[in-house]
Image (spheres, rainbow, N blue to C red):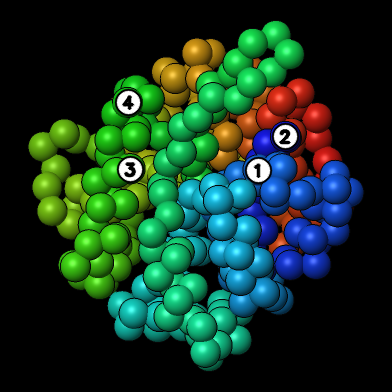
Amino acid sequence: MSTYVIGDIQGCYKPLRKLLATVDFNPLRDRLWCVGDLINRGPKSLDTLRYLRDLDKAVTVVLGNHDLHFLAIYHGACPNRGRDTLQELLDAPDCEALSHWLRHQSLAHYDCVEQAEGHQNYLMIHAGIAPKWTLQKTLELAAEVELTLQGPDFRDFLANMYGDTPRRWKEKLTGHERLRCITNYLTRMRFCDERGNLNLQVKEGLTAAPEGFRPWFEFEQITPETNILFGHWAALEGKTNRAHVYGMDTGCVWGRELSMMRLEDHQLFSV
């Protein structure tokens, strides 16, 4: 059995299937971890979501900002934007079932993977974590959003999900501000300062850091005991310059590569 983690697919269904074919992926034997942004911007969101849903227990997903955006559109919390490529999915007869499946996925996933020299711990999130969050804190806060998204008031959450404030995590946050702040760290962040203040406007690579800000993974305190897997930041082209921190988004939807790593030996594959 092999465990593979794959970068942002964003509806690039053909590259997804081609990449899995290069390793002879078998859902009866292997496992696939997805770092989020399964859909949107690419041409085949419907096919992508159907395929991943049908993998059943062979796939583990964390939600990205584009996945949450689709849920907001489908449930009437946000309009379909000009750059979205979700209409085929929204018009599909099984859209309700697919949205239900997506709404019940995680925002953070933690597990151990056996390797030749023992086992390695992995935390998978879509975007990032706040500077002072421990592994346990990250999982607990992710669970707060997950329970809300899966609960009776999920439409209210989706309607209040958008926005760049609060800019920094504080334990005393409550209600929509608390959930929005957690969601922004886990699904949207790239740059922050040492106190965790977010800059959500700059999307370029490491050299584009605004004054006083650095990539979030320069402040994290979870490694080396736990490896971190994330997507979201295509401009990095998979390069973080940090041990135990693996950026998996290599910009397939922007005409570059779709990348995947086998967790047992860290071998990379791409198309």
Viewer-side label of 2, 1: 2
Residue at the disc numbered 3: 142
Q: Tell me which corner region of the image, top left, top right, bottom left or bottom right, holds residue 115.
A: top right
Circle 3/circle 1 CB separation < 8 Å: no
Viewer-side label of 3, 1: 1
Using residue 95 as the reference point, say whether residue 71 is left or right of it: left
- Image coordinates of residue 103 in percent, x first then y, are 39, 63
Q: Residue at x 34, y 22 (%)?
A: 134
Circle 2/circle 1 CB separation < 8 Å: yes
What's the residue type where badge 1 is placed?
A: Arg
Residue at the disc numbered 4: 136
Query: Disc 2 or 4, which lies upstream in sequence?
Result: 2
What's the residue type where badge 2 is placed?
A: Met
Mark 1: give few (<14), some (14-19) or many (20+) Cα within 10 Å.
some
Secondary structure of the residue carrying tag 2 is loop
Residue at mark 4 to residue at mark 1: CA–CA distance: 24 Å
Residue at the disc numbered 1: 31
Residue at the disc numbered 2: 1
Residue at mark 3 to residue at mark 4: CA–CA distance: 10 Å
Query: Disc 2 or 3, which lies upstream in sequence?
Result: 2
Query: Disc 3 or 4, which lies upstream in sequence?
Result: 4
Residue at mark 2 to residue at mark 4: CA–CA distance: 28 Å
